[in-house]
Image (tube, coloured by chain):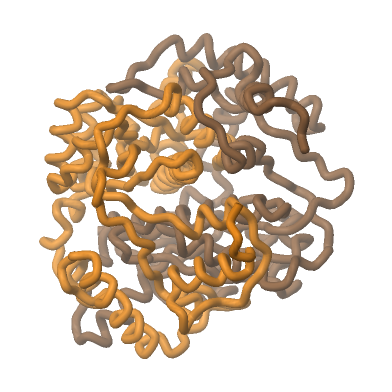
Chain colours: A brown, B orange
């Protein structure tokens, strides 16, 4: 039994996320909120096997998420094969935790099921050819995945999203035998921490930047960003990360198309993979 | 204290989601998993005000979700103004619960912050002009929103996503004063149930359809779909919904572009809203 009272724990959780100076007003609280607030991305996994039927449990959480108009335009491919993980890691900027983790879930925006349904019913589903449906399928996959992420953390596991699979979505489709109309939105490492793996709650932009009331208003964003740069600089130093402010990170990532590690070609790749994006 | 043992509760939750015939193997369990499995979309809200500082609490959960490379390319606009909700409901197929709910959160794929950052740093961020970044911002908004959804349910509130805002993303941008490079991915009603509002756990496709092991394999999908059609038929009848199988729903929605309520134009709309989609 934790002897610290709930409001102290709540304040402490909010301070870790936003910094002492930017703790928002305390509202309702729950064990699940405490879990959500304590989320940390893990980047070093032990090879310990997962509890029996963990995969089915995470997928049940994923299935329980909202899905656009109940169309359920997502799938997930569970990869445990070492050689496949090695190949997927090559796509994902050689992040070695993709190979380390005992379960690598690849979340699929899946319009191929609708395509098959249309063929079986004797028609071409025009809607499937739109940008909207590529986006809807990606959102459905993300809603499902985030429920699985929360579920994993609720049973003492840790996780890490791998957006780097979009560096070469065509290669991922080839490795996982995806049919036309299906692509990997991102991967997710699931497992238990390797001893000593760094894992600290990462500071986020203050609520005054991301939360707008009634209409969108740009406040004193530049000054707030400077403060956040300082917080992230301290965090990076403490976590042995490349010394970089948040502003530097954004600029490095987005200033030139060549800094996007292949993702600047995603549009052409998706068209080749059976998403006309009309 | 619930006197039913955890594995019975777990089995019951899985049976509600997948049907008695498709209960997956029982794995680890937690209170949060029980919450996730019990998710129901609510479509009738009372006008009761929310507990103090609910909004800040939900946004703290949203901020704690993973975000692509920590770029945090999302924002949220919290709408409580009656007249604005009325106008938003007109975009969202006149769903009256948009007006009823005490808090309507509009989740924004937000590249405008990066655009401003670039200008302040004296450069144009080329990456922002890509399809990839429109998608990343939409994924970031969705990860954040789903954490807020789970948080809301964990404190006894109910919610409903409103994808219908994409029927006319330009009108939503106008109503909420969104800057170029920002668009509303979806809305979210938050509140407490109106007495008698239907709210039952909705059956989902079985795991054998959505979960693939090692590689994507299409199994006996057509036969499984027929069974799911039967389950959804029974569910629809019990919940006073239009009698429709799942197959009929997919076909009605996607067979013709004209069935997409305006979303077939999303590509052109996003380009106009400052997403070049290159």
From this view, report whether residue B180 is shown above or below residue B134: above
From this view, report whether residue B212 is shown above or below residue B241: below
Q: Residue at (26%, 84%) from the top-left corner?
A: A119
Instruction: Give coordinates of residue B117: x percent, y percent.
Output: 47, 21
Instruction: Give coordinates of residue A210: x percent, y percent.
Output: 45, 25
From this view, report whether residue A143 is shown above or below residue A170: above
Instruction: Give coordinates of residue A1: x percent, y percent.
Output: 77, 38
Q: Is residue A119 left or right of residue B130?
A: left
Q: Is residue B274 left or right of residue B53?
A: left
Instruction: Give coordinates of residue A164: x percent, y percent.
Output: 59, 52
Q: Residue at (36%, 46%) from the top-left corner?
A: B278
Q: Is residue A173 left or right of residue B86?
A: right
In front: A59, or B257? Answer: A59
Query: Image quadrant of residue A250?
Result: top right
Is residue B130 at least partly visible in the picture? no
Query: Image quadrant of residue A118?
Result: bottom left
Q: Is residue A243 left or right of residue A174?
A: right
């Amino acid at each position: 039994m934790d002897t610290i009272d709930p409001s102290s724990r709540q304040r402490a959780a909010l301070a870790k996320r936003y910094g002492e100076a930017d703790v928002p007003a305390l509202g309702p609280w729950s064990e699940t909120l405490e879990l959500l607030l304590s989320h940390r991305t893990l980047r070093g996994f032990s090879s310990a096997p997962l509890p029996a039927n963990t995969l089915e449990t995470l997928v049940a959480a994923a299935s329980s998420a909202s899905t656009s108009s109940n169309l359920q335009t997502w799938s997930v491919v569970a990869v445990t094969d070492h050689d496949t993980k090695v190949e997927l890691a090559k796509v994902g900027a050689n992040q070695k935790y993709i190979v380390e983790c005992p379960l690598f879930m690849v979340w699929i925006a899946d319009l191929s099921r609708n395509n098959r349904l249309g063929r079986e019913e004797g028609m071409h589903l025009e809607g499937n050819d739109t940008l909207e449906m590529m986006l809807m399928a990606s959102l459905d996959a993300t809603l499902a995945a985030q429920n699985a992420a929360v579920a994993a953390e609720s049973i003492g596991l840790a996780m890490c999203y791998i957006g780097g699979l979009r560096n070469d979505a065509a290669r991922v489709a080839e490795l996982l035998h995806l049919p036309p109309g299906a692509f990997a939105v991102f991967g997710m490492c699931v497992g238990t921490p390797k001893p000593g793996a760094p894992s600290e709650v990462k500071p986020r932009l203050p609520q005054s930047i991301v939360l707008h009331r009634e209409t969108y208003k740009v406040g004193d964003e530049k000054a707030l960003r400077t403060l956040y740069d300082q917080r992230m600089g301290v965090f990076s130093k403490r976590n042995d990360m490349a010394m970089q402010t948040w502003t530097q990170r954004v600029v490095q990532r987005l200033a030139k198309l060549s800094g996007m590690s292949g993702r600047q070609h995603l549009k052409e790749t998706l068209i080749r993979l059976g998403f006309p994006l009309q």
